[in-house]
Amino acid sequence: MNKVQDDAGDKNTAGDKISKAREEAVQLVYKVTEQGAYANLALMKTLRHSKLNVADRSLLTNLVNGTIRMLKHLDWVLNVFLKQDINKQNPWLRSILRVSAYQIMFMDRIPHFACVNDAVEMSRKQCDTNLAKVTNGVLRNLIRHKDDIKYPTPGSPEYLAVYYSHPRELVDTLLNVYGAEQCENILAYNNQPARIDFRVNTLKTSRDQLIQELHQDGVKCYPSPVLPCSIRIGAMEGSLDDLPAYKEGKFYVQNEAAMLAAIILDPLPGEKVLDLCCGVGGKTTHMAEKMKNQGYIKAYDSYTQKIDILKANCTRLGIRIVDVRPEDIMLVEEKQPTGRVMLDVPCSGSGVLNRRSDARWNKDIIAIKQLTRLQLQFLQKAGSLLKDGGYLLYSTCSILPEENEYVVQDFIADNPFDLVGFDQKLSFFPLDAGDKENARQGMLTLLPGKYDTDGMFFALMQKRVRRKG
């Protein structure tokens, strides 16, 4: 497994006080694993009030996300050197050992002595002297013998679950659906830090112009090789919010797989579009850009916090055609049916597990029966709002057939809809022969990492025109 390319801003040496980045990382891992906090929200809150320099902020982010992501792997390794299972240890000791083991196993540029010294001092501070001795012994043994650790039988489901740190149930599901090679590719991609992509706001600039401006502001970036509207970010100093191009609304941060949704639905200038479950508006604003800010998009979501962010995004991007409604979509009523509906439903998120470090441990990843019932209900509601001959795009960020093909097939079986091919709309995208054929048939699953993007599912449907009389 690849080592993390970390920015080791921490210069702590023996005798210095405990590294603030390491100490805050342990506190955050404790909050996530012991108190049920969400990793991304807890980390964001800490960074917002932190006085750490840029390098240490990066170190803190890597430590927290990496440790949470690799929990299963780290616990397996630590249990080799512990007399009692790690789940029976003092909760603070658990967090200290996990963060420390992550540095030793996955971060090349972290000096081992600094990691061990800080861990021992934190154990003494949070626990007691005896557990500080345990920390010292375990970590020094790990350093000496890390290359000798025996994992489960290579290639077995248990090995894949432990080595790539995923729930065993999810691994079994991926093996059953996609086979051993694809499964391992997906697991490996999920452990890579998520890349940042900028979707160019074509209402305000071009890709070449934006790249030039970003370069001038110290952003290392390059044009996407697979999407003409995307820029891939290599490195960026400072905060995203501080970039002049961001303030001026010249781009939107969105993964390339998600950018395909608006391209597939293909709304035209002057049309009326419904966006159900619009969230913070990534797909909404992309549709508005494709419509050249002409027409009408009515966007619904039941979460007012997301609605507020969507409004702010529209203002920043200069979008004027979006009418935002905070409402449960099952209660939506429209006087006139529309010609196009975007439906990006709540899902397990199994295609975007590299985005949130704790997402893989969410029970919704494997307990999806309730989700699929909701998805079908939403799809039926969306279909009822569409006029004859209109188009409906159903999308998820899941790669599990239960949430994707099965839901669509159940819907089509009981409703006057047909799948519509969209391979020509993705002629610029390097789909392989199998995926191109799937798109031609009207349904496409992008596997995580296959095209260097997140995982997504799309199904394009058209409502049949009823015969008069």
Image (cartoon, helix red, strand yellow):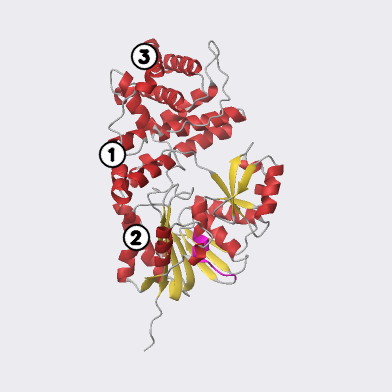
Report the side of 371 relative to 195 (left or right).
left
Q: Is residue 297 above or below residue 120?
A: below
Q: Earlier in the sequence, mark 1 or mark 3?
A: 3
Report the side of 128 relative to 215 (left or right).
left
Q: Which residue is mark 2?
A: 405
Q: Is residue 105 magenta?
A: no
Q: Is residue 223 above or below residue 381?
A: above
Disc number for residue 265 = none
Q: Earlier in the sequence, mark 2 or mark 3?
A: 3
Q: Residue furthest bottom?
A: 469
Residue at (44%, 57%) from the top-left corner?
432
Q: Earlier in the sequence, mark 1 or mark 2?
A: 1
Determine the CA span between mark 1 and mark 3: 32 Å
How many badges with numbers are in the image? 3
Q: Is residue 326 visible?
A: no
Disc number for residue 157 = 1
> Which segment is the magenta one?
261-269
Report the side of 217 relative to 451 (left or right).
right
Q: Amino acid at mark 3?
A: Val
**Residue 206, percent from left and from top:** 67, 56
